Amino acid sequence: MDKVEIIESEERRRYLTKKRNKKIAIRSTQILILIALIAVWEIFADLGIIDAFIMSSPSRILDTFAHLSSNGLLHHLEVTLYETLVGFGLGVIFGIIIATILWWSPFLTAVFEPYLVVLNSLPKIALGPVIIIWMGAGTGAIIFMAIAISLIVTVMELLNGFHATNKNKIKMAQTFSATRSQIFFKIVFPSNLSTLFNSMKVNIGLSLVGVIAGEFLVSKAGLGYLIVYGGQVFKLDLVMASVIILALVAALLYGAVELLENIVIRSINHTSKK
Amino acid sequence: MDEVLKLEHIVKKYQSDNGEVLSVDDVSFNLKQGEFLSIIGPSGCGKSTILSIIAGIEKATHGKVYIDNEEVDGLNSKVAYMLQNDNLLEWRNVYKNIILGLEIQNKCKKENLEYVDRLIKTYGLEEFKMSYPSQLSGGMKQRAALIRTLAIKPELLLLDEAFSALDYQTRLQVTNDVREILKKENKSTIMVTHDIPESISMSDRVIVLSSRPGKIKDIHTLDFDGCDNPLKRRAHPKFTKYFDILWGEMIG
């Protein structure tokens, strides 16, 4: 393949500098906005322009973070993480199984399509009270909520991906007399690994939504519980600290899925290099 | 020469909500061992349908197909099919791609793998065995796809517009390579194409189909005084003569 020869000319240096400067400008503006927001918030709270009791303030939130273990934030974080990961994991596993069964049987796909469409557009949170009655007011109901929210999306995305698999590649395998399961495992599933990981990236966030919604409704622990509790007793520092932790957790979980994607894709390439 | 393939009065009708479409109408021909046959005709005349029926991917509405005197009923491993795109799997390296057919047919035996190694060496892919398809040129990909097809040692090879996705230069080179490989391996081949010069440069015989429903208009036996190198044939005085005849029939 042709390689573009890089010549270190004056023009090129200028181009690179311009590109770097633009990047620095964007990043520093992003950081400045954040600092400005925090600063304004703190100053307004200090000057009494806003009520720190209702709006909290950056220094109060920081103080809450400093006492993470004594105010039980860590424990609540642990509970939420556990529920999210279990719900997410089960959602993905069941999602793959259901999508595979539906791909296998065009009859079942046709039969279940309208149900999937309705279930997909239904706000699953509306099922919360029903789920609590079915599963009892506990961790089970919260995990079920997380699964309910993420499962249908996984099934829909994977099934669409499976159906959109390159028809010529399938035909190629057919010409070697491949069975349906060979077509699935050798062509369809590997073709859709990136679809799977994309749906996982969406679902890790959705699972968190399910867990928090579940915790709002029933729990006695978890960040969702903490937010509701903090709101009820006017401990807004706690609410804000929980929200910030939630944002960090969401970002970290997303990063973890991305890392997993890289590892899996690299290991597949590695094994095929034998 | 032995007869590898025989088609008897093949008719194919497609049913849809808008009615019935007659795609192929009473097509019969045969193919001898080691022969290279092209089918040309206007778009939608049922060329590819005929290949699908031979391969057992589709069933004929009427008529019978025999391979080695056995009636074709469903997919069978005597036939290998090469499609328009190389269809290499991008997550497998070249070697793993080439042995895909053997893997599917549970034939990864020592002798077959040795045959694959020989093909890879002979046809210049040894260096690229561990490369991924994205690292190969169009011509190399097509060669890898051909070796994948040959690896299962088919009796009969079907090429469905197999070179039409390649740029012109690569295409000339690849058709030359493929013809040479097929001749060396003594494979019987049917190629479907809309490219008249390609069919003349590669084939022993050319079948011209009419527009839909596809019926055989004529079967031409090409005689280039023993020359079967596609590039040399293109420079042969008879080349334009055959082109004029086939072109006339195609548009007529």
Image (cartoon, rainbow, N blue to C red):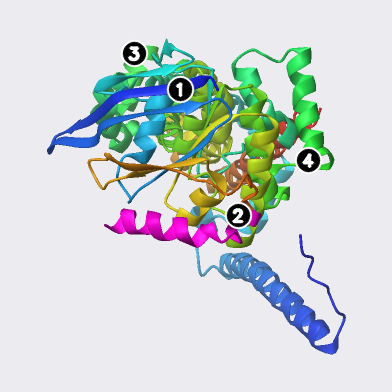
The amino acid sitting under disc 4 is: Leu
Q: Which mark is residue B5?
A: 1
Contact (CB < 8 A) between labels 3 and 1?
no
Dominant secondary structure, magenta? helix
The amino acid sitting under disc 2 is: Arg
Q: Quadrant of the N terminus of chain B?
A: top right
Q: Which chain is indicated by disc 4?
A: B
**Mark closer to the observer (4, 2):** 2
**Mark closer to the observer (4, 3):** 4
Taking the image as drawn, is residue A261 in sight? no
Find numbered disc 2 in the image and state the secondary structure of the residue it sits on: helix
Residues packed near mark 3 inside 10 Å, few (<14), some (14 to 19) or many (20 plus): few
**Callout 4 and callout 3 share a chain:** no
Contact (CB < 8 A) between labels 2 and 1?
no
The amino acid sitting under disc 1 is: Leu
Left/right placement of residue A265 relative to residue B47 reads right
Q: Residue at x 26, y 39 (%)?
A: B215
Find numbered disc 1 in the image and state the secondary structure of the residue it sits on: strand
Mark closest to the chain's N terminus, 4 or 1 = 1
Q: CA distance from mark 3 to mark 2?
A: 78 Å
Left/right placement of residue B231 relative to residue B127 reads left
Span shown in magenta: B231-252
The residue that label 3 is drawn on is A134
The amino acid sitting under disc 3 is: Trp
Q: Is residue B246 magenta?
A: yes
Q: Please, which residue is most extreme toward the bottom here? A: A10
Q: Is residue A204 magenta?
A: no
Q: Position of residue B151 (x, y in %)?
A: 67, 25
The residue that label 4 is drawn on is B125
**Mark closer to the observer (3, 1):** 1
Q: Which mark is residue B233?
A: 2
Q: Position of residue B192 (x, y in %)?
A: 44, 42
